[in-house]
Amino acid sequence: MLPKEGPVPDKKQFLIDELSMRESWRLFKIMAEVVDGFDAMSEISNGVSIFGSARVKPEDPLYKDTEEIAAKLVQAGFSVISGGGPGLMKAANKGAFEAGGESVGLHIHLPFEQATNEYLTTKVDFRYFFVRKLMFVKYATAYVAMPGGFGTLDELFEALVLIQTRRIKHFPIVLYKSAYWGGLLDWLKERMVADGFAGEADLDLITVRDTPDEVVSYIKRHVIV
């Protein structure tokens, strides 16, 4: 007597189940990254997240200004958090490191990303941008946005949305150099606010400063260390 044949496997359903299992396992990778980040950052206090272009060279005045801002923040009792890469991220870490302070690098793995800089006292690696952004905002008491590209804008507006919607407590957001940010702020006021897509008070979430001393002084006035 021949054995009874079972149901013919559904190839499409098998592929769906396989994909679902892969997605479920990805959640564990995300959870592990969050836990690792929390563990690495748990002792970081009074952090100031500094953002800016990875393309700025050491001879650029912006590089020197970023170093100075980071060093003076350390001297005022703050830790410095950057993306841990080159350019203005490296300048921020260098200023903090050479001033003897906590210098954190939150490094993202990208196909074209350079290695982390050498001025880190705490280094955390990430594969997921949203987990990395969580660490930037969770451990920050202030943001400083130096001139930069899409990544800098991404971090800036992430914080603005969270503060505007009261998902996090309000903290200082400082844009460095009115010559760079002025056009964006004019557009926000003349188009976004004027057209009713944001409130005029929302612009008060941002301040612009033009010297390292002004940046540090503003943060010291608004954050108790």
Image (cartoon, helix red, strand yellow):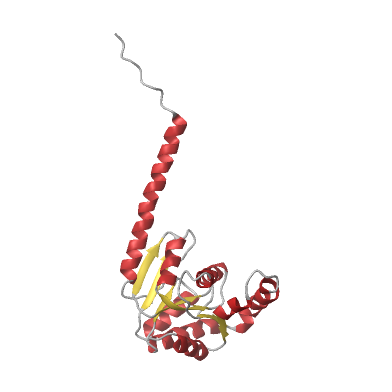
Q: Which quadrant of the view contains residue 85?
A: bottom left
Residue 139: image location, x then y, percent? 39, 73
Residue lying farthest left? Answer: 1
Residue ID at (44%, 30%): 11
- 194, above or below 3, in the image: below
Along the viewing direction, whichever of 8 and 74 lies nearer the viewer: 8
Q: Is residue 218 above or below residue 81?
A: below
User: Left or right: 198 with respect to 40?
Assistant: right
* Whether residue 178 can be seen here: yes
* Percent coordinates x, y for residue 42 in the rendering: 32, 72
Placement of 4 over or under 161, stated as above or below: above
**On screen, residue 134 above or below 174:** above
Is 9 on the left-hand or right-hand side of 145?
left
Q: Quadrant of residue 20?
A: top left
Q: How many marks?
A: 0
Asked whether the viewer can see residue 60, the reply is no
**Residue 66 place in picture, x, y as percent:** 49, 82
